[in-house]
Amino acid sequence: MSALSGGLSPDDVFRLHPKIRWTAYSVDGKVVFCEMRAGLQSYTSDAEDRSFMELGPFIMSGVAERLTASGGAGRLESVVVNLERDSVLLTRVGIGYLAVSVDRTDAYSVFQEIEPLLPKLRQ
């Protein structure tokens, strides 16, 4: 386990919900972990997932944070990326970015269920 992850592991994330397919964590563009749930087939390659985690969180959250400049809407908590088959939730956890993916058809309900659990990971 890397010191960068603050003790966070893929298993910690998978325990949040049984429908979480994949999770990754990066700090300053360095991928700390990138793991598919055991027994599931990934929609993307490991290289694609790692490439996404190197720059994706910076770019997506940076653009979204432009909506928070006035402070009226509050601070950015997360970004959701919807693909045809998959949805990814990106959120700040500790000093890095956590990504969690679920099948698109389950995304709305799963993300609503895990959202209240994320502050424990953010500590």
Image (cartoon, grey):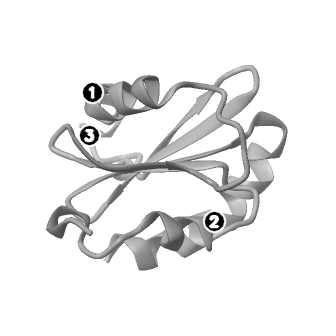
Label 3 to label 2: alpha-carbon separation: 28 Å
Alpha-carbon neighbours of circle 3 within 10 Å: few (<14), some, or many (≥20)?
A: few
Three-letter amino acid code of the residue under disc 3: Ser
Compared to residue 83, the image places residue 26 above or below, namely below
Residue furthest to the front in view is: 39
Q: Answer above or below: position of 55 versus 12.
A: above
Left or right position of 15 against 56: right
Marks 2 and 1, how far apart in space?
Answer: 24 Å
Residue under label 1: 55
- The residue at which mark 3 appears reads as 70
Which label sits on residue 29?
A: none
First along the sequence among labels 3 and 1:
1
Q: Residue drawn at (63%, 65%), measured in percent from left and top?
A: 114
Q: Nearer the viewer, residue 35 or 6?
A: 35
Amino acid type for the residue under numbered disc 2: Ile
Badge 3 or badge 2: first in the primary sequence: 3
Q: Quadrant of residue 17?
A: bottom right
The residue nearer to you, when weighing 113 against 65, is 113
Judging by the rendered image, the residue that carries numbered circle 2 is 114
Residue 93 place in picture, x, y as percent: 33, 62
Quadrant of the snapshot with the N terminus:
bottom left
Q: Residue 31's x, y, as percent?
A: 27, 44
Residue lying farthest right? Answer: 105
Q: Nearer the viewer, mark 3 or mark 1?
A: 1
